[in-house]
Image (spheres, grey):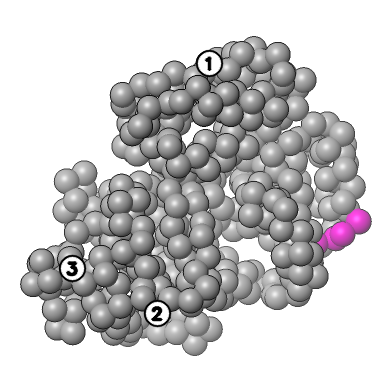
Amino acid sequence: MEQTQWFSPEKIAQLQVEKLRQLLINANTHVPYYRKLFADLDFQPEKIVSLADLQRLPFLDKPTIRAHLEDLKSDRAQGLARFNTGGSSGEPLVFFIGKERVSHDIAAKWRATRWWGVDIGDPEIVVWGSPIELGAQDTLRTWRDHLFRSKLLPAFEMSDRKLDDFLDTIRRFRPGMLFGYPSALSHIAQYADKAGIAMHDLGIRVAFVTSERLYDDQRKQISHTFGCPVANGYGGRDAGFIAHECPAGGMHITAEDIIVEIVDPHGYPLPHGESGEIVVTHLASGDFPFIRYRTGDIGTLDDKVCECGRGLPLIREIQGRTTDFVVARDGTVMHGLALIYILRDMPEIKVFRIIQENLDLTRIQIVTETGLSPLLIDRIIESFQSRLGRDVVIRVEQVSDIPAEKSGKFRYVISKVAGI
Ligand SMILES: [Zn+2]
C-alpha cells in the first residue's frame, strides 16, 4: 500500500478491476448467495473488464444481509468475526468479517496514520465508546494497548470529574496522536480551555477523528487546544476504512481495497462531482462479501488530483453521520452512541429513533417485525435508566414506520438538552 498509493489513477483503477474480478469469481465459487444471484442474472464474473460491469449487480442493503446472513458466508471462511453496527443509520445489523479484511482495514489505517508522521508504536490516546473495546474482553484490550502503546478513555461518560482525569491522563501519557469522535475530542478540548489547562505543549502531532461528521468549529477547537492539525477519516465496521484525509487536505479513498460508487435516490450511478449515496464494494471481503453495499451516507467523488501527489481518488462533502450528546439526570454528559448501542444489539428491532425531550423524559420509537414483548420493553427501560438515571421516564412507543430524515436513511434523533 505504501507503493500503490503513488500509482497513477489509471493504474489504480486497473488494479481495482483485477481485484474485483477475483472477488466476484471467488463469490461465485464459494458464497451460496452470490452463486444463486449470478446464475439468476446470467452474470459471468470472469468476463468483468471494467468497473462499470459492477452496475449489473443489485445493491447489498441491510435487509438483504439480514435475510441471507448464513448464505453470505464463504464455504471456506475460517475464524469469521461477528460484528454489529447501526450507530449511524439506526438500523441494527449483524454481519461477519474475515481475517483478510481485518488485516487490510488495519493496514489502511496505519498507512493513513503515517501520512501524518505518526507510526506504529507511537503512543496514542483513544477516546472511544465501542463495546468491543470497552466490554469484557480485557485480554484483547491489554494486548492491544501494549502492542500499539494505546490508552483508551471511555467516551460515553463525561462528568467534570472524569474530564479532569482525562486531561490528567493525556498530560502524563504525552501521546503522539489522539483518536476519537470529533464531538468527544472537541468536548474535552472545550473543557480544558474553560478550566485553563494547557494541552498544546505535549507534542501531539495530529488528532484523528472519525465516525461522525466533523464540523468546522470542532476542527478549530481541537486544533487550537491540542496544538495540532485534525485529520478526518471516513469508514465503519461494516463498510471498511473508506477514506482518510492527507496533510494536503484531500480525502483519499483506500482504492486498493474499496470501490466507491455514488448513486442517486433511484440507484443510478452519478457522474463525478454530483452528490449522492455512497455505495462501496470491499475488495478484501471474500469471506463475507460486501458488494455494492449501501452506506446510507451522502458524498461526492472528486476528479481533482491532490497536491500531495498520491493517485488515490478523492471523495468530499461526506454528510450524514452526526451524533449529539445526551445528558443524564445527574448532569453527566454522555455520547449518544451510549444509548444507540443498547438498541442496536437487540435483533428484534428493525429501526429506531431516540428523542430526549428533556432531562426527565426520553421517548424511544421502535419498528419491529414481530412486535414488542413486555420483556423486551422492560429490558430497554432498565438499560436506558441505568445510563440516564433511575427516576427518568423512558417511554417506549411501537410505530409502523419512522420517516427518513436528512439523507434518507437517518432515523434517529437525539435532541440536545438546552445549555449543552
Ligand atoms: Zn493528498
- How would you rate the neighbour count of disc 1 (Cα within 10 Å): few for under 14, some for 14-19, many for 20 or more? some
- Residue ID for mark 1: 395
Residue in the image at 24% along x and 57% along y: 59
Question: Which mark sits nearer the N-terminus, 2 or 1?
Answer: 2
Residue in the image at 53% along x and 65% along y: 81
* Dominant secondary structure of the residues highlighted in magenta in the image: loop
Based on the picture, tell me whether residue 27 belongs to the magenta stretch.
no
Q: Is residue 172 left or right of residue 370?
A: right
Image quadrant assignment for residue 247? bottom right
Callout 2: SS: loop
Disc 3 marks a residue whose amino acid type is Lys
Give the CA distance from mark 3 to mark 1: 44 Å
Instruction: Tell me, yes or no, whether the two marked residues, 3 and 1, touch with CB atoms within 8 Å.
Output: no
Image quadrant assignment for residue 319? top left
Q: Nearer the viewer, residue 150 or 38?
A: 38
Q: Which mark is residue 36?
A: 3
Residue in the image at 70% along x and 27% along y: 386
**Image x and y of residue 388, in percent:** 68, 24
Indicate which label's residue lies in the foreground, 2 or 1.
2
Residue range corresponding to the magenta coloring: 172-176
Q: Is mark 2 within 8 Å of ligand 1?
A: no
Question: Which mark sits nearer the N-terminus, 3 or 1?
Answer: 3
Residue in the image at 14% along x and 65% along y: 56
Give the CA distance from mark 2 to mark 1: 46 Å
Report if residue 330 is visible in the image.
yes
Q: Which mark is residue 76?
A: 2
Q: Nearer the viewer, residue 149 or 271?
A: 149
Indicate which label's residue lies in the foreground, 3 or 1.
3
Disc 2 marks a residue whose amino acid type is Arg
Give the CA distance from mark 3 to mark 2: 17 Å
